[in-house]
Image (cartoon, rainbow, N blue to C red):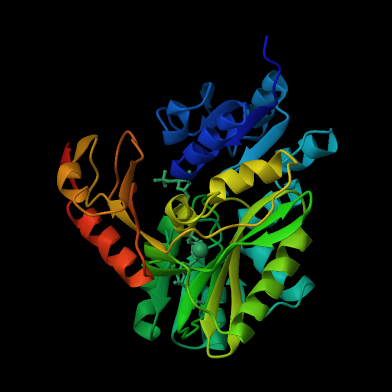
């Protein structure tokens, strides 16, 4: 029998699917877990489980049953207190249980970055009643950004521009959060020139940075990403210093997506994913080792040498316009007219309005050309739904 390590993935979306593929390439046995059946990574894993990952006991049961060598969170919404316990019992949580716990909600990571590590961020306040929210908005001033503590891909997020927006912003946050805890972060609105993800790998032989990835967001969810994004020498130095400090603070081995805002000479930390990042899907066409391959190598305790950017590239995500119980994606023949273009179809079983279902990835001699190619390819794809 082939003896190998076992990796258990908590969260099985499009990013986890690529992690599993990379782990399998290195001979690792893979188990995918998510809250619903037919999640993308499940189709490529050795086996899978469907549980409520916020349920401490259920999570523990699966871990005790499978006894994995690596517990790899793929989303934030996990019973992280169970991960803390399991780590104490000797399980290896990627990158660390502390990283999973601090990034599970916005308060943990924001306080850690701004208050413990003294890293520059937008000013912020937390509120768990409408009255406290009103006070927080008053302190921060308009415009400000309102987000539920536990959400991702912009769910529940809004910009509050004036007194008239306040009730609406509170309501959006209450409906968009993942747990029914009425707590929000009110953030100063940063008028940034650009925002980037700095993929940072902590491996057995040191910390490595990928070329910065530029991206654009609409309603808190990404709509375009490209690599490289040119930074001035001063910006790059600050960005790498922030990334080094935050990832050292979280510890462990793995890849992190450090989200930063660039405003003039100032670099602000926004948040960090202790795992591959959606905007980092671009590395599947730009780097010799994608963010997923780097994550797996680092997790396994294997060394990383140079991270080579082979050519500029860009991504353009395809989102469903509505909720469909049954749907198909058409237009691949037309999309593939674009040179140096690939498509990843995630095969999510159902859609909701705005749910990401596929991504177009293009390479070119310049970032601009790659962006145009990816966007044209994605525009030729359509989500045709029923029900
Ligand atoms: N304080 C801010 N000032 C200006 N823009 C902001 C601010 N906070 C967030 N944004 C915008 O909203 C986007 C999403 O915010 P954030 O990353 O906090 O949300 P998220 O739900 O965690 O998204 P994801 O899970 O995709 O990373 C940011 O990338 C940025 O474009
Ligand atoms: N910004 C975080 C992010 O992109 N996470 C990715 O989206 C999946 C959830 O998608 P869903 O909400 O469509 O199920 C997650 O499992 C992960 O792969
Ligand atoms: Mg973000």
**Residue at figure coordinates x 64%, y 39% from the top left:** 72
Position of the N terminus by quadrant: top right
Figure check: 274 above or below 14: below
Residue 383, x across and y down, in percent: 20, 45
Question: In which image quadrant can residue 87 be found?
Answer: top right
In this rendering, the answer to whether 66 lies above or below 85 is above
Left or right: 170 in relation to 294: left
Decide if residue 322 is on the left or right side of residue 367: left
Judging depth in this view, the residue of 179 and 308 nearest the camera is: 308
Residue drawn at (30%, 68%), measured in percent from left and top?
A: 369
Quadrant in the rendering for residue 181:
bottom right
188 in relation to 71, above or below: below
Q: Residue furthest top?
A: 1
Q: Nearer the viewer, residue 322 or 259?
A: 259
Q: Residue drawn 41% across and 79% down?
A: 160
Residue 223 visible within the image: yes
């Amino acid at each position: 029998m082939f003896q190998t390590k076992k990796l258990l993935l908590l969260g099985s979306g499009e990013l986890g699917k690529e992690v599993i593929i990379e782990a399998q390439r290195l001979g690792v046995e893979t188990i995918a877990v998510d809250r619903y059946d037919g999640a993308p990574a499940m189709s490529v894993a050795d086996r899978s489980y469907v549980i409520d990952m916020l349920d401490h006991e259920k999570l523990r049961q699966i871990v005790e049953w499978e006894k994995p060598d690596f517990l790899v969170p793929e989303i934030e919404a996990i019973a992280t207190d169970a991960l803390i316990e399991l780590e104490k019992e000797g399980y290896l949580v990627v990158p660390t249980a502390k990283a999973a716990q601090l990034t599970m909600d916005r308060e943990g990571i924001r306080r850690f970055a701004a208050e413990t590590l003294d890293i520059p961020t937008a000013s912020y306040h937390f509120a768990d009643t409408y009255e406290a929210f009103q006070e927080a908005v008053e302190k921060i001033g308009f415009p400000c950004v309102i987000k539920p503590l536990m959400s991702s891909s912009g769910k529940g997020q809004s910009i509050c521009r004036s007194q008239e927006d306040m009730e609406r912003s509170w309501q959006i946050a209450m409906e968009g959060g993942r747990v029914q805890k009425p707590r929000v972060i009110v953030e100063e609105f940063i008028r940034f020139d650009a925002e980037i993800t700095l993929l940072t790998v902590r491996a057995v032989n040191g910390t490595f940075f990928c070329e910065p990835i530029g991206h654009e967001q609409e309603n808190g969810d990404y709509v375009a990403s490209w690599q490289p994004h040119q930074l001035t020498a001063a910006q790059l130095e600050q960005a790498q210093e922030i990334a080094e400090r935050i990832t050292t603070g979280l510890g462990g081995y793995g890849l992190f997506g450090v989200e930063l805002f660039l405003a003039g000479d100032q670099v602000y930390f926004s948040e960090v994913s202790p795992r591959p990042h959606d905007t980092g899907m671009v590395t599947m066409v730009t780097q010799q080792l994608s963010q997923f391959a780097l994550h797996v190598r680092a997790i396994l305790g294997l060394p990383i040498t140079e991270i080579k950017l082979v050519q500029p590239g860009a991504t353009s995500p395809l989102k469903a316009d509505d909720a469909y119980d049954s749907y198909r994606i058409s237009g691949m023949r037309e999309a593939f007219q674009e040179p140096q273009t690939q498509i990843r179809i995630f095969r999510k079983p159902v859609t909701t309005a705005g749910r990401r279902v596929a991504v177009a990835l293009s390479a070119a001699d310049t970032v601009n050309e790659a962006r145009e190619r990816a966007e044209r390819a994605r525009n030729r794809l359509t989500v045709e739904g029923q029900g």
